[in-house]
Amino acid sequence: MFSYRHAFHAGNHADVLKHLTLIATLRHLMHKDAGIQFVDTHAGAGLYRLDGDYAEKSGEAADGVLKLKGLPADEQVEALKDYLSMVASFNDKGSSRVYPGSPFIIQRLMRHEARDRLKLFELHPTDHKSLTGNIEQLEAGRTVSVARQDGFEALKALLPPPVSSSGSRRSMVLIDPSYELKTDYYRVLDCIQDCLRRFATGTYLVWYPIIPRPEAHDLPRKLKTLCSQVKKPWLHATLAIGRATGGDDTGLSASGMFLINPPYTLKPLLNEALPVLEKSLGRGPGQGWSVESGG
Ligand code: SAM
């Protein structure tokens, strides 16, 4: 436990898929005026340096967000353009030194007038400290909270969300574990089951790695079964960048996002963006993308 540090992976292809999907989901949710409770159960440090030791050592952003720089305007389809402008908004013109993690992406889009709230959980002592410091700089007051707690457990007390000033209950939850422990796969399933019992109309986003391990393969299948049992719509998107021929890279080459109660606008946006991502980020054999939905 605690050997995972997101700073090594910030801005990689998995972050591109996750954050592009997150932004497209947030944009849709914000069409309605009523306030939303956002929860990020595995928040990380919040902000990352792409020119720092961690990122430079791993070089993962080079096969992710940095490869998308300079994409011709006609290939910058809506969701991709939105994602790239979000990243650009954290940097001086033309530079790519800073990469925003999910807490900062969500916070950037939150609405003061709607009284949106963001609850962040991070267990790693160093990342929790960085996250706390980064969030303090925002001077966001009570709108954003950070706790060094187990995100799976903490979520239970937050659902159903409080009634907003316009009388409705709305929540979006991002569940983005590191899957360092095999038990994370089972915990995600138990957590989603519990969330749907507590608040069936919430929007839930789960990221997972596509790796040759039965638990990883089974997770989306089991989530689909769960959704059909409770008759909830779902969307499953994957992006694989493949392996360079002759390359000796053994790092993560594919990942997926599974959403429950996804916005209806998401599927067409991903169908448009993922082929561009595959073309831009693909390295060779095994590259591909998929979007499927049901319920
Ligand atoms: N969501 C972040 C983003 O997109 O910018 C990245 C999060 S990273 C993939 C996963 C984080 O979860 C790590 O920083 C890890 O320390 C933390 N973590 C691991 N187990 C946890 C748990 N049970 N509760 C809260 N945080 C946990």
Image (cartoon, rainbow, N blue to C red):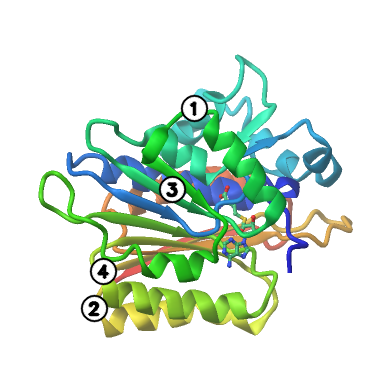
Residue 295 in view, yes or no: no
**Residue occupying image coordinates x 36% and y 48%:** 25
Label 2 environment density (alpha carbons within 10 Å; few <14, some 14–19, many ≥20): few
Q: Quadrant of ligand 1?
A: bottom right
How far apart are the alpha carbons under marks 2 and 1?
Answer: 36 Å
Numbered circle sitting on residue 85: 1
Quarter of the rendering containing residue 196: bottom left
Query: Residue 276's spot in the image, x, y percent?
Result: 53, 42
Q: Quadrant of the C terminus?
A: bottom left
Q: Earlier in the sequence, mark 4 or mark 3?
A: 3
- Image location of residue 93, percent across then percent down: 60, 14
Q: CA distance from mark 4 to mark 3?
A: 20 Å
Q: Quadrant of residue 143?
A: top left
236 left or right, relative to 6: left
Label 2 SS: loop
Label 1 sits on a secondary structure element that is: helix
Regarding mark 4 in the picture, which secondary structure is present there? loop
Question: Is there any visible trace of residue 250 in the rendered image?
Answer: yes
Closer to the chain start, of discs 2 and 4, is: 4
Residue behind mark 3? 22
Of all residues, the one furthest to the top in this rendering is 93
In the image, taking residue 92 as reference, residue 144 lies left or right, namely left
Query: What amino acid does circle 3 point to?
Result: Leu
Which residue is at the front of the view, 276 or 123?
123
Residue type, numbered disc 1: Ser
The amino acid pointed to by label 4 is Phe
- Residue identified by numbered label 2: 231
- Name the residue beneath numbered marker 4: 199
> Whole-Å distance between the Cαs marked 4 and 1?
33 Å
